Image: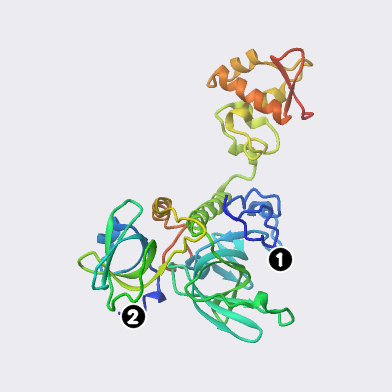
Amino acid sequence: MWSSHGGFESGFGGSSIGGGYTQSPGGFGSPTATQGEKKQRSRSQNIVPCTVSQLLAAEQVDETFKIREVEISQVVIIGIIRQAEKAPTNILYKVDDMTAALMDVRQWVDTDEAGTENVVVPPGTYVKVAGHLRSFQNKRSLVAFKIMPLEDMNEFTTHLLEVVSAHMSLRKNMTAPKIPQSRGSFGMAEMANYGSGSSVMNGLTAHQSQVLNLIKSCSDPEGLSLKELKSQLHNINMTTIKQAVEFLSSEGHIYSTVDDDHYKSTDAE
Amino acid sequence: MGDVHEGPRPRIATRHLAQHLGQPVCFVGRVEKIHPSGKLFILSDGEGKNTTIELTDPLDEEISGIIEVVGRVTNQATIMCMSYVQFREDKSAFDLGLYNEALKIIHEFPEYYPFGVTKND
């Protein structure tokens, strides 16, 4: 939706910054992936939208920073440049996002490259900064790997929302049960038996998931009929069931067998 | 008055002015009117409500469109402006209504969008 600015190197996965950081396959996965293992120097693979106030308030243990027990390393902030100081090897910006005092943002300059990378962004410009959080002599700063002037100020509005969304998700992940399927609590006892977390995270709506799971569970050669689906899913009307079946069929999750009323799952169970 | 840029400046809409009397804030709105003296201008927020922005020194340029003001709320519920910035709209128009919705969210979840630094939340 928002214009892409040429993309980041560090595994952003999708072309747009706007959202999808928890779902993108590009190595962003939810922090709970490493919940069980306490690696000594596990580098967080996430990039988390933050406010300067959150970066300043993050707990620090040795070289790692944590917000709510979740390790943060790569972050994105959006703010306005208040000051820019050019030194031979780096540019030091002071970035303001209104949540706290100014944040030092250092951008290393490649002295071999011709001038294009080293253009100083003028004060008064709103920028999106992606970088690593650092602390030196008790002062926190960001080492930026990308500083992009905003071309569309609606990206700034998006950032406000992304920060809330990201930190809310991070908190939920810390308290969520380890078994993914417990989140798919559609109020039906059978649902809890169905496998590895495919209930919510596969891009299907609740109704589609319920229909798919029932079809998957059927071991008859002719599959499950629409009538049987309706009798098992009391809270869903026939039209919705038919729509779900059509969608699942066009996506390749199910196929019709003896007639258009009977379906089996393409996943071998 | 101190440098307001050294601390948190909550983002607010017109209806929040009364709760922030005397405090530094950040206000984003559309220019509605500029007083001929250049020492006062009116911004409307995403809900269409107006806020008066006062300046110690008169404006030395024409302003229009979306302005973000950093300043302190006076006892008359106007904002004494310390600095302002014009949002660029050369590539895309800024959706002020959407910004207002985002404000509601960040106000509803101050634990996920904190103004000010509190250790160990």
Label 2 Cα crowd, 10 Å radius (few <14 / some 14-19 / many 20+) = few
In the picture of the structure, the residue carrying the numbered disc 2 is B2
Q: In percent of the image, x 76 and y 20: which residue is there?
A: A219
**Residue A201 picture location, percent across and down:** 64, 40
The chain under label 1 reads A
Pick the front one: B65 or A251: B65
Q: CA distance from mark 1 to mark 2?
A: 44 Å
- CB contact under 8 Å: marks 1 and 2: no
Q: Is residue A25 above or below residue A240?
A: below
Corner quadrant of residue A60:
bottom right
Query: Could you tell me the amino acid type at mark 2?
Result: Gly
Q: Is residue B72 above or below residue A70?
A: below
Q: In percent of the image, x 29 and y 57: which residue is there?
A: B14
Residue lying furthest left in this view?
B76
Q: Is residue B54 above or below residue A138?
A: above
Query: Could you tell me the amino acid type at mark 1?
Result: Gln
In the picture of the structure, the residue carrying the numbered disc 1 is A40
Tell whether A196 sits left or right of B60: right
Tell whether B75 sits left or right of A140: left
**SS for dot 2:** loop
**Residue A92 picture location, percent across and down:** 57, 80
Q: Are marks 1 and 2 on the same chain?
A: no
Q: In percent of the image, x 67 and y 75: which residue is there?
A: A116
